[in-house]
Image: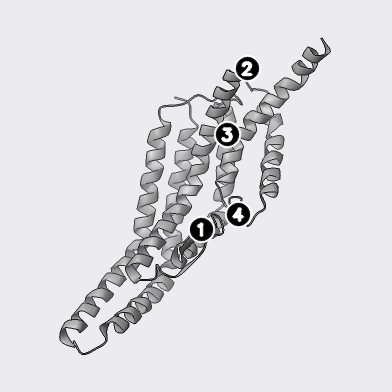
Amino acid sequence: MLGESLVAIVGQPLWVFVSILARIGPVLMLSPPVNSSGLPMRLRALLVISVAALLMPIASAAATPMPGDILHWVIALVGELMLGVLLGSVIMLAIVALQVAGHAIGNLSGMDIAVSIDPSTQEDLPVLSNLLSLLAIATLLLLGGHRMLMQCAMESFAQYPAGGVSFQEHWLPELQIMLGHSFVVGLRAAAPLAIALLLSNIVTGLLARTLPQLNILSIGFNLNISALMIVLFVSLGSMSWVFQSELATWIDSCQRAIAVR
């Protein structure tokens, strides 16, 4: 009898806390700077648990009752995780877009052999990818994108009570829209550098035809690197502007994703 009373008292708050944790955890773990491996895992876990505890008073009033069996527990938590991953993917795709642009630029310039460790994944990535990734993170934090994302995640509890997430058909189209905008951002960011490197290769080809006695490999590589550095220095501001303009679209996708239809 005492055990049943204890379960009735502790069970519902525990259920609400676990549901919030399942939704907020992926949002924080996929978003910078929390997703950086330079941040100890224990500190990241403590941050997620603290945020979930702070959201409990907000989400408890409208939370669904605790399921009576393990199967419904699992189904409800999977729904929470899916929504959390969808919301966390908004910022992750924004960062990946500029990383892909850095990959493309590195391949065109021959700088893909210059690699460094990505602090968030501990993988070797081209230097340009890491540079543009840091640019995206800095722009995101300056614009308050992390606060917008957390606001979107908090507003999701008004649409989907804790433990009451159900799969929505419009999630996949919204994810497709976010992927499309990621491609657009990567293309727009890489376009000036790609055009400059293409012109550099054309000039190198013309020199090779007119002056075949020159060591065209060394000249072409130096010409590519010079064009890359000059245009990169000039276009960093425009990349930040592109990222800023598209960030609003990503946040709008986040707001549409949490809307119940």
Sequence-first disc among 2 and 3: 2
Amino acid type, callout 4:
Ser
Residue placed under numbered mark 2 in the picture: 67
Q: Label 4 to label 1, Cα distance in Å?
A: 11 Å
Q: Which of label 1 and label 2 is nearer to you?
A: 1
Please name whichever residue, 244 or 185, is drawn nearer the observer in this view of the structure.
Answer: 185
In this rendering, the label closer to the viewer, 3 or 4: 4
Left or right: 51 in relation to 220: right
Task: State which tag comes first along the sequence, 1 or 2.
Answer: 2
Q: Residue at x 36, y 45 (%)?
A: 180
Task: Residue at 63% x, 17% y: name it.
Answer: 67
Looking at the rendered image, the disc whose residue lies closer to the viewer, 4 or 1, is 1
- The residues tagged by marks 2 and 3 sit, at their Cα atoms, a distance apart of 23 Å
Q: Earlier in the sequence, mark 4 or mark 1?
A: 4
In the rendered structure, the answer to whether residue 206 lies left or right of residue 182 reads left
Front-most of residues 218 and 167:
218
- Spatial CA span between label 3 and label 4: 28 Å
Look at label 1 and name its amino acid. Glu
Residue at 62% over, 16% down:
69
Q: Are marks 3 and 4 in contact (CB under 8 Å)?
A: no
Circle 4 residue: 37
User: Residue shown at 68%/30% (left/top)?
Assistant: 17
Question: At which x and y percent is residue 175?
Answer: 41, 39
Using a 10 Å C-alpha cutoff, classify the residue at mark 4 as few (fewer than 14 neighbours), some (14 to 19) or many (20 or more): some
Q: Are marks 4 and 2 in contact (CB under 8 Å)?
A: no
Q: Earlier in the sequence, mark 3 or mark 4?
A: 4
> Of the numbered discs in the image, which one, if any, rests on residue 155?
3
Residue most extreme to the left: 210
Of the image marks 1 and 3, the number of the one nearer the N terminus:
1
Name the residue that disc number 1 marks: 123
